[in-house]
Amino acid sequence: MEQILGPAVPSPRAVLRPIGIHDVVITGGPFARWQRINYEASIPLGLEQMERSGALPNLRRAGGEGEGPFQGYRFQDSDLYKQLEAIAWEHVRAPQARYAEFADQAAAVLERAQRPDGYLNSHYQVVKPDKIYTELEYSHEMYCAGHLFQAAVAAARAGIGDGLLQVARRFADHLVEVFLTGGNDAIDGHAEIETALVELYRLTGERSYLELAGKLIDNRGKGLIADTGMGGLYAQDHLPVREAGTPVGHAVRQLYLESGIVDVYLETGDESLLECSVRRWEDLVETKTYITGGHGSRHDGEAFGERYELPPDRAYSESCAAIASVHWNWRLLLATGQGRYADLIERTLHNAFAASTSADGLRFFYVNPLQRRDDLVEDAYLGRRREWFACACCPPNIMRLVASLGGYVATTTETGLQLHQYVPGAVSAAGARLRIETAYPWDGQIRVTVEEAPQGEWELALRVPAWSESTYAAFSWTGDDRAIRAAEDGYFRIRRHWREGETVELRLDLTPRLTYPHRKIDAVRGCAAVERGPLVYCFEQAGQPEGVEVDDLALSPGAPLRVRAVDDLEGVGRTVLIETDAAAVDQPRGGLPYTSKPLATSTRVTATAIPYFQWDNRGGGAMRVWIPLA
Amino acid sequence: MEQILGPAVPSPRAVLRPIGIHDVVITGGPFARWQRINYEASIPLGLEQMERSGALPNLRRAGGEGEGPFQGYRFQDSDLYKQLEAIAWEHVRAPQARYAEFADQAAAVLERAQRPDGYLNSHYQVVKPDKIYTELEYSHEMYCAGHLFQAAVAAARAGIGDGLLQVARRFADHLVEVFLTGGNDAIDGHAEIETALVELYRLTGERSYLELAGKLIDNRGKGLIADTGMGGLYAQDHLPVREAGTPVGHAVRQLYLESGIVDVYLETGDESLLECSVRRWEDLVETKTYITGGHGSRHDGEAFGERYELPPDRAYSESCAAIASVHWNWRLLLATGQGRYADLIERTLHNAFAASTSADGLRFFYVNPLQRRDDLVEDAYLGRRREWFACACCPPNIMRLVASLGGYVATTTETGLQLHQYVPGAVSAAGARLRIETAYPWDGQIRVTVEEAPQGEWELALRVPAWSESTYAAFSWTGDDRAIRAAEDGYFRIRRHWREGETVELRLDLTPRLTYPHRKIDAVRGCAAVERGPLVYCFEQAGQPEGVEVDDLALSPGAPLRVRAVDDLEGVGRTVLIETDAAAVDQPRGGLPYTSKPLATSTRVTATAIPYFQWDNRGGGAMRVWIPLA
C-alpha cells in the first residue's frame, strides 16, 4: 500500500494509521538485502528496460517525437508508471539525483504525450485513436491510468517528477468527466484504477476521484464488460462485488479490485464493502492460498482455480498477485487492526514475493511454482528466472514494493505504535522512537528499545505470528522474563508510562517444523513441507548429496530437523539450511504407471532444505516444497 | 485407423492385416450400444450442425453460392470432412439412403468450392485468398486437406459421395505440385495430412502421395514453422522426428503425427521411423498417460506436460487425443503384432474415449477430467457435456471412430486370425468365420466358435489383456478345460487343423481390484482407483448414500469390493456397480489449510463406484477416479 505510505492522511475508518517510509530505517536482514539489490541491480536494469522495451519510446511517439512502430502490449505504459513509483519510494528511502532526474525527464515525456483533454495512453493514441474507451474489456486504459496515479502520488511525496501530479490530475479529471459526470458506465477489464483514485483523492482532497472509484466498483458485476472469450469470471464481472463469493478468474485483477474496495470503505465507511471483501479473504485463505502465500493455481487465464485446487508444479502464483495480496492485506490491517492480515503479509513477503527475484536482483520469476521437475521439457522458459518479459508487469511491480517495504513495518494509533514486521533498525512516529535489534527471520529474538515515547500512557503492540506454535512467546522486559499471551487479534500489548531506554524482548520459537496440508488439497496429499518461523523451505537438487534425487525423497515425520546456519552460501548469501534423515525411494518403471502391487525400495540419505525464497540461485534442477512422507 | 479398414491393401511391413468393417458384426455390449446411439442420435445431430455451425455454408460461399460472413474457425471445413467419414463408415456398417444422399450433396458443394487448380479451403478462399499457404503455422490448410482425404477414402470404400475422391485427388495433386515437386518446404502446424496421404496412396496407388507424406515428416523439427507464440514444442517442430524424445506440446498434433510416421514406415520400411515412434510410445505410456488411457495434462496449450504431470482435476485428456491414440496404436499393432498396443486401445476405448459421449449420444466432452469438484466455479462450461462446441473438433471425430469400431476387433495373417477386442457377434475374414458370444466387459467369459476355417493348419490368436492379474486364463476347448499361457506378446495362440463348430472359451478374471499410481505421479499420491477388467471406475456424487460426500471418501485397501450388476440404471443403462465399505473423513476448516497438527475424524459409510465412461449422466456433482486411502 505504497500509496498510503506518505504523510499520514487519516482515513475516517482506519483503525491503524500508516507511517511514512522515511520514518523507518531498515539496517539488516532480508528486507535490507532486498532493498540493496533493488537499488544496486534491479532498478538500474528496469530503467534501462524503459527504453529497450518500448515504454518510453511509445510515449515519446505519442507526444509527436520519434518514429517507429508501437512496441509491446496495450498496457506498456504501465511498466513506466510502476518504474517511476519504484524510484519515487526509493528516493524517499535513500535520495538519488539520478532518480530525480529520470522522473523529471519521464514527466516531461508524459506532459508532451498527454492530449489537451487529459487523455493519455500511448497505445491508443498511436495505434488506434478511434478506439479510445471503446474496448475497455481488454484495453487496460484505466489500468494504466491507475498506475500513473500511483506513480504521481509517490513522486509527489518524494518531491520528484515535477509535473507528474499535474499530468495525473488532468487524466483523472478527464476520466471523471467521461465516466462519473458524463454518464458513461463502462468499467475497465483489469481492476487497479479504483485503489489509485482513492489514493489520489487522499493526496489532493478531490472528492470526485473517490466517487469515481466507488462508481467503478459498484458497476462491476453488472455484465458491462464485453466478454473477451475468457468469460465474466475472468474480470470479476460475474456478480456485483457485494454479492460475489469466492475469489475467481484472473488473480491479480481480483486482488487489485479488493484493494480498491477496502480503500473506498476506509474513506466512505460503507460497511457492505468491508464485509464482502473480508468474506472473500476468508474463503481465499482457507481454500485458494499456497503455503508460500501465493495465489493463482492456473496458467490458463492466470486464474485462481477451484477451491483446494493448489497444484505445486503448475502453481501460477504470479509475482504481481503476491504484491497485490500485500496491498489488500495492508488495507484490511488498517481497517481492522487484526494481526491475521499482517501474518499473511509476512508469509507472502518472505516466501511467494521474495522468491520472485534472484539473489543478485537481475532476474525475476513471473510464475512462482512450488515444484520443478528435473527433466523440464515443456515451458522451459518458465523454469528459470529471466531478466525481463515481453509482458513485464512483474519486475517493476516488484521494485516498487521492495522500495516501499519500510512502510509495512509499523502503524500508529492515537496512543500507541504497532510493530507488524520485524526488522533491525529504527522506527520514529507519532512522538515515539524505537530501536529494534534482531536477526529475524534467521533468529527469533527481537529486542525493542523505547528510546523516546510520548508523555502519559502509551501502548507498544508486538505481533505474535500465527505460525508460532502457541500464543505464548518468551518475553523479557528490562530483565523481567515472563511468558506473555497475545490478544485474540494476534498482538501482545504493553500499555504504560514509558521511561527512555526501556527494553522489550520477544523470543519466537524457531524450531523447524513439518507442516501438513488439509486433506482437501489433493495435489499434495501424503506430503509435508518444512517451515521455520515465517520461512517455507524447499528441497533443491543443488543442495543434496551426490546421487540423491529430490524427486526420490521421502520424509519421516519423526526425524529430527537440524538447523545449519551459513553466513554466505555461494550464489545465495546468508541462510539457514535444515538437514534431516530421509529416505530415497526407488520404484521400478516400465509400462503404465498403475499397478495393483506397487513395489518400492528405499535407502537412508541426508536431505537438505533451503528457504524457498532462495531457490533457483544454484542451477536449474528439481525443487520441491512438498515432500512425500515415507 | 479407419483409413485401412476397407478391403485390405497389404502394406509391405504390416505384420497383421486389417479386415473390413463389413467383415465384423457387433451384436451387443458397449460397442453395439455406442454404434446404436451414434446412428440414432449423434450423427443426426452432427448433420444438423454441419449447416448451423457454418461448415457447409462456408463451403457454399467458397463455391460462389450464398452470402454472409465466414463462420467459425479456420479449420471449420474439417468438421464436415470428419462428419462425412463418419457417415461413410456408418454406411458400410448399416447402409442408409439418407447418408448416401448427404454425401452426394456435400460432394457437389465441394466440387463447386474447389478452385480449378485443386486448392480447397473455404476460410482462405473466402476470407484471405492472398494468404494461401503463407501462414501454415496456424492455417490448418493441410490439416483440413488430410481430413478431406480420409473422408474421400472412406466414402470410396462405402460407395457413396460420388465425386468426393476426385476432389480429394485434385487437392492432393495440387499439394504434390506445390510441396513435393514445387520445392516449397513448408509444413502444417497441425499434423494430420501425413497419415491421410498414405491412406490415399493405399487406395489409389499414387506414389507421390506417399512421398509427400514422407517429406512432410522429414521436414518437421527443422524450425520451418513460424512460432505462433506457443514455442516450437507446441507443434512438434523442436526436433526432427527421428531425434525427438518424449511426446511434447499439443497432444492431438503429436499423436496424429505418430500415425503418419508409422504409416510411412508400413509402406517404405524405413525402420528409423518405427523406432522413433515406439521410443516415444514407451515414454508416453510410462510417464504421460492417464489410467483412462487419456493424454494431455494441460489446458494451457492442450499439451502433454512434463513426465508424471498427471493431474486428475485439470486433466485435459481431449476426446480427439483418445481417438488419435487409437489410430496410432492400431498402426503400431499392425506393424508389430504386439498385444500392448491392443491393450492400450482397449483401455482408451472403454474409458477416455467412451466417456466423451453421454448415454443418449446427444452431448459430448471436449475435455475428460478424472475429477470434478463439487463446487465448480471456474470453467463451468467444461464441467458438463455439451451438445456442440465453437471448436467442434471432437464430436464428429467421435462419430467417425464409433462408426468404424468393427475394424479394430480383429486382424488376419496368411495363416490365422487375431482377436484383439472382445465383442459378441461374428467375424468373417480370410476364409474363416467365427461366432463370438460374450457379455464382455460386464462378464469375463468369451466363447469363440469356429464356424468355418481354412483348410490345413490355421491359427486363432486371442489377446490376454495386460490388466489380467496373471498371464494365465481359464480356457476350455470343446470341454477340455485347462489353464493357458499367453505368449510374451500378449496373445494365446491355437494352431491346428480346425473342425467346424469347435469352441474356444476364454475366461478372464473380473474380480474388482484397487490400482495404485506410481509414486512419481504427484497429483494422485496416497490414492487408489477401482478397476474391473478393462474398466476404470469412478465415485460419482449421484450414486452415494444421503449425506456422503465424494470429496470426503477414503478407501480401505483391505475392504471387499462388491459387484452389483444393474440391468438399466436410470440415465445410464446397463452397468456393473462396485460397492465398498469406506470412511467419510472430516477435517476442520478455518484459516490457512496448513498445520503441523492435522486432526480428522471419520465415520464408516458404503461408497459406490460406477464405470468412468458412464459418469455425468446423473447430474453435475463431484466425481473422482482416484480416492485417498484411509
Image (tube, coloured by chain):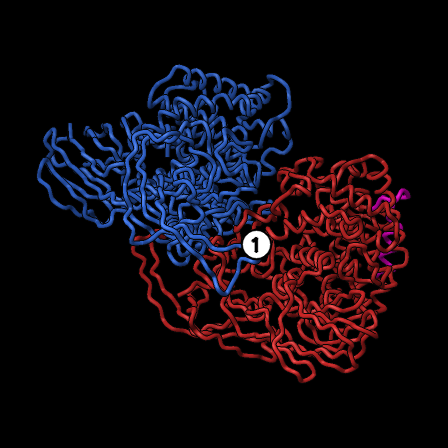
Chain colours: A red, B blue
**What amino acid type should be assigned to the residue bearing mark 1?**
Glu
Q: Nearer the viewer, residue B406 or B138?
A: B406
Q: Nearer the viewer, residue B6 or A291?
A: A291
Q: Residue at x 78, y 65 (%)?
A: A413
Residue B486 image point, x, y percent: 20, 47
- Direction from residue A361 to residue A179 in the image, left or right: right
Residue A505 image point, x, y percent: 67, 78
* Residue A199 image-quadrant placement: bottom right
Residue B348 image point, x, y percent: 37, 41
Q: Which subunit holds the residue at mark 1?
A: A
Q: Nearer the viewer, residue A290 or B130?
A: A290
Residue A420 lies in magenta, yes or no? no
* Residue B38 image-quadrant placement: top left
* Residue ranking furthest to the bottom: A479
- Direction from residue A240 to residue B205 in the image, left or right: left
> Vertically, is B87 above or below A479?
above
Quarter of the picture holding the N terminus of chain A: bottom right
Q: Main secondary structure of the magenta part?
A: helix
Assign a secondary structure to mark 1: helix
Q: Residue at x 81, y 56 (%)?
A: A11
- Direction from residue B495 to residue A409 in the image, left or right: right
Q: Residue at x 60, y 18 (%)?
A: B64
Quarter of the picture holding the C terminus of chain A: bottom left
**Total number of numbered labels?**
1
Q: Is residue B404 visible in the rendered structure shown here?
A: no
Residue B135 image point, x, y percent: 60, 38
The residue pinned by badge 1 equals A286
* Magenta span of residues: A103-120
> Vertically, is A168 above or below A478?
above
